[in-house]
Image: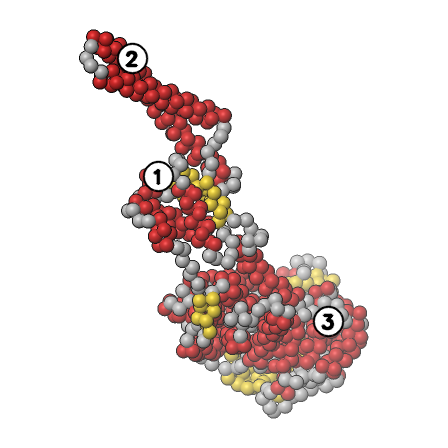
């Protein structure tokens, strides 16, 4: 049998039986999927998570908080899923201290009212007396009641001042105490945030939101919409619009999100249409970098273990590189076939529902294989060249770390695809060879790229692979025999571009 | 296998590593490729193995250039030793056997046979990393000839071996020689080379400095050596006439004299100068010739 196949089988079987392969095939995907899905399930699944409690603080009894709560519940009632947020009014403190203050204010009010009443009665009586015919006794009565009137008015005015002072004091204290209570609830994690409604500000459409973490993370968009509705409602009321009309105008809107996928259209599901492709890309990443990582480490190890010279005494450089790349490429394909097999089993068991996951098609499986092969050949040829340059185990370790960091780069940049899968920048980046596999696989379900994009990206990848294999072959030919010397960048370029 | 190396040269980054080196190797003969560090020995071996291509000249194996069939008849023991540390002895031997064209079955049978013959059969399933350094060296040696090569290239075969294993390897090389295999041996250990090799080629800075059988090299060296052990400091022997050079090693004086020098008269002069405890007249060893030649080139 040709040495090429001997190397192919050796590389395939020695890595196939390794723990690293088993981990990369069965454990890493589960871990990756878990990292992505578990927090999402925790956030999305109402059974496993309580709704976020948002408080609402108002300083008077206008009932704005109640209105916000009602509008929010109405808007959510149209959706199938339970509300992620619960709006509750923050109740006033009923502590003894506050009760005393309130009873004092109440007492002052009672006193004031009674003096007001007494004053009004005196005024009424004097009016009654005044209307009688003028007699000496009437004048005497008016004179006598005048002193009462003045005295009562003065007492009432003083009581008024007392009441206003106490009321102002209690109002200020009320505001402070109410806000303090809301803050305390926030700190005690009874609330994740609270709305602070001041009537004057509210009429201008301003409401404060207090929280410990940035509001973006609390998903309070729907609460904002509820506030907007209440503000508009108030304004319409002020304009004199009928209540029925107002309710009609402010009927909540249900936005159904439909995504076009190839020829099909499907309702957008965050878990399936957004997180699904990310998981698929992680699988692609694992398959490319498991095999090319094995190749890289294998060459480094053969160099540090001083095996490479014996190999080169038996086979040519070309046979050695080709055998390695082919053997580990088959390993990568085998890994993907295992995943395909598991996917089919899960479909058979109805765990994965093909009808709901529209990108789970034979065509996309073909694209996955295509971009695996292209990505693997590209990275493998680069890794084999670089791996052959170093023989010191410490250098090799550092280089290994660096290559791992470099290989994660396309995944980091993939965020751009998630945001705008069809933007010009993403399209251009899809044609940059190190990014092509990740970007195109992510764009396929998210942005449905055109056939042109597939053809251009594949063409560029093929040309890049030919160039990188050519360069890697040159580097490997001399690099594999270099020992005890760390090559400089200039030397590496000399190796790449030297003739013959 | 007849191997003919014809005027091969190699240059790396404008530095001439090997220049016009020629060499003939025949079955049943051991050729010693000698030279100091950086002389170009390993590059020469790599060119013979077709790992590197010479810039000029050619290497013929039974009048043919290297091909896959030829490559499978060569056994190579590199100076830089190493094996796959994680894998078992049998797997490693089988893999290298298969790379040399043996079938899976044949390579397995040969591996077991060799391990048994070298009393290492108990290590059959043992990972290489679990073996002692000496045992690993022996496994490396087995890798070199598992496919029963016609032509063996041994680069520093005794490097790092204990005396017991050196003896085993030396005997094995003798066996190969008797079996009619062609052997090219590169070594620093000139004593070993002297006992094992039939033909020598000394290279320095890529150039051939000396070549021939030991007899021819000695003859061409045109000098003999008088070894003197004396009670006095032997440095007084420097002035004796007809002595080309005196070298003192561990209080023993080595006097280099021309091959036709009047030995009797020189010896008498020595006796007059010092109170000798021992005096020998010797043909120069390979080591002496090697050192003198390299030193004279440096001058």
- Alpha-carbon span between mark 3 and mark 2: 122 Å
User: In the image, what residue occupies the spot 60% across and 90% down?
Assistant: B64
- Alpha-carbon span between mark 1 and mark 2: 41 Å
In this view, the residue in front, B24 or A382, is A382
In this view, the residue in front, A76 or A342, is A76
Is residue B76 something that shows in the picture? no
The kind of secondary structure element at disc 3 is helix
| Left or right for A182, reference B67 | left
User: In the image, what residue occupies the spot 46% across and 27% down?
Assistant: A98
In this view, the residue in front, A73 or A360, is A73
Mark 3 sits on what residue? Answer: B89
| Marks 3 and 2 share the same chain | no
Mark 2 sits on what residue? Answer: A148
Task: Look at the picture and state if B16 lies above or below A135.
Answer: below
**For the residues bearing labels 1 and 2, Cβ distance under 8 angstroms:** no
The kind of secondary structure element at disc 2 is helix
């Amino acid at each position: 049998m040709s040495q090429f196949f001997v190397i192919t089988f050796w590389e395939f079987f020695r890595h196939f039986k390794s723990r690293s392969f088993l981990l990369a095939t069965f454990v890493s995907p589960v871990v990756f999927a878990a990292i992505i899905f578990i927090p999402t399930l925790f956030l999305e699944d109402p059974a496993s998570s309580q709704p976020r409690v948002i408080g609402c603080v108002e300083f008077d009894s206008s009932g704005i908080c109640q209105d916000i709560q009602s509008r929010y519940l109405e808007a959510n009632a149209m959706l199938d899923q339970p509300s992620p947020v619960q709006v509750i009014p923050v109740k006033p403190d009923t502590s003894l201290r506050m009760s005393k203050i309130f009873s004092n204010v109440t007492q002052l009010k009672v006193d004031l009212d009674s003096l007001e009443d007494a004053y009004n009665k005196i005024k009424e009586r004097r009016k009654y007396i005044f209307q009688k015919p003028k007699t000496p006794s009437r004048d005497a009565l008016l004179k006598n009641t005048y002193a009462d009137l003045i005295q009562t008015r003065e007492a009432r005015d003083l009581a008024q001042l007392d009441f206003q002072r106490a009321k102002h004091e209690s109002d200020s204290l009320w505001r402070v105490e109410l806000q303090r209570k809301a803050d305390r609830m926030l700190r005690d994690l009874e609330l994740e945030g609270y709305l602070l409604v001041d009537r004057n500000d509210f009429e201008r459409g301003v409401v404060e939101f207090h929280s410990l973490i940035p509001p973006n993370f609390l998903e309070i968009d729907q609460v904002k919409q509820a506030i907007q509705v209440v503000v508009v409602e108030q304004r319409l009321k002020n304009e004199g619009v009928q209540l029925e009309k107002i309710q009609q105008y402010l009927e909540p809107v249900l936005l159904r999100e439909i995504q076009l996928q190839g020829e099909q259209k499907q309702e957008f599901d965050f878990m399936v249409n957004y997180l699904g492709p990310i998981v698929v890309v992680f699988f692609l990443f694992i398959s490319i970098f498991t095999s090319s990582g094995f190749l890289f480490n294998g060459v480094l190890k053969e160099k540090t273990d001083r095996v490479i010279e014996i190999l080169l005494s038996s086979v040519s450089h070309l046979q050695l590189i080709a055998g390695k790349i082919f053997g580990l490429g088959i390993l990568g394909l085998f890994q993907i076939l295992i995943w395909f097999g598991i996917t089919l089993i899960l479909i058979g068991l109805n765990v994965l529902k093909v009808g709901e996951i529209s990108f789970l098609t034979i065509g996309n499986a073909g694209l996955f294989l295509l971009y695996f092969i292209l990505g693997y050949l590209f990275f493998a040829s680069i890794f084999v060249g670089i791996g052959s340059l170093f023989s010191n185990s410490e250098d090799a370790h550092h280089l290994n770390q660096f290559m791992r960091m470099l290989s994660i780069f396309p995944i980091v940049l993939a965020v751009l695809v998630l945001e705008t899968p069809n933007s010009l920048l993403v399209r251009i980046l899809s044609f940059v060879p190190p990014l092509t596999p990740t970007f195109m696989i992510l764009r396929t379900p998210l942005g449905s790229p055109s056939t042109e994009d597939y053809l251009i990206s594949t063409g560029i990848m093929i040309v890049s692979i030919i160039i990188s294999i050519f360069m890697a072959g040159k580097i490997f030919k001399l690099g594999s025999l270099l020992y005890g010397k760390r090559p400089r960048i200039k030397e590496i370029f000399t190796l790449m571009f030297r003739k013959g | 296998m007849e191997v003919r190396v014809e005027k091969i040269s190699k240059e790396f980054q404008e530095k001439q590593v090997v220049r016009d080196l020629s060499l003939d190797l025949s079955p049943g003969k051991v050729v010693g490729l000698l030279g100091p560090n950086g002389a170009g020995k390993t590059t020469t071996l790599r060119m013979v193995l077709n790992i590197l291509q010479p810039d000029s000249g050619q290497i013929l194996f039974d009048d043919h250039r290297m091909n896959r069939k030829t490559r499978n008849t060569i056994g190579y023991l590199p100076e830089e030793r190493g094996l796959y540390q994680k894998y078992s002895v049998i797997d490693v031997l089988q893999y290298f056997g298969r790379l040399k064209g043996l079938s899976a079955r044949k390579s397995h049978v040969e591996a077991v046979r060799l391990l048994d013959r070298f009393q290492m059969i108990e290590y059959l399933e043992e990972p290489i990393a679990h073996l002692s350094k000496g045992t690993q060296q022996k496994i490396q040696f087995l890798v070199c000839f598992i496919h029963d090569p016609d032509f063996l290239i041994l680069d520093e075969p005794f490097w790092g071996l204990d005396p017991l294993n050196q003896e085993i390897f030396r005997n094995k090389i003798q066996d190969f020689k008797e079996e009619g295999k062609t052997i090219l041996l590169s070594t620093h250990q000139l004593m070993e080379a002297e006992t094992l090799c039939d033909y020598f080629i000394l290279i320095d800075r890529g150039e051939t400095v000396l070549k021939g059988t030991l007899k021819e090299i000695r003859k061409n060296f045109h000098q003999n050596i008088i070894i003197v052990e004396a009670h006095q400091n032997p440095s007084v022997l420097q002035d004796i006439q007809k002595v080309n050079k005196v070298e003192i090693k561990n209080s023993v004086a080595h006097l280099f004299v021309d091959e036709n020098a009047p030995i009797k008269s020189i010896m008498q002069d020595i006796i007059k100068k010092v109170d000798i405890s021992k005096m020998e007249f010797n043909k120069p060893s390979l080591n002496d010739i090697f050192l003198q030649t390299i030193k004279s080139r440096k001058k």
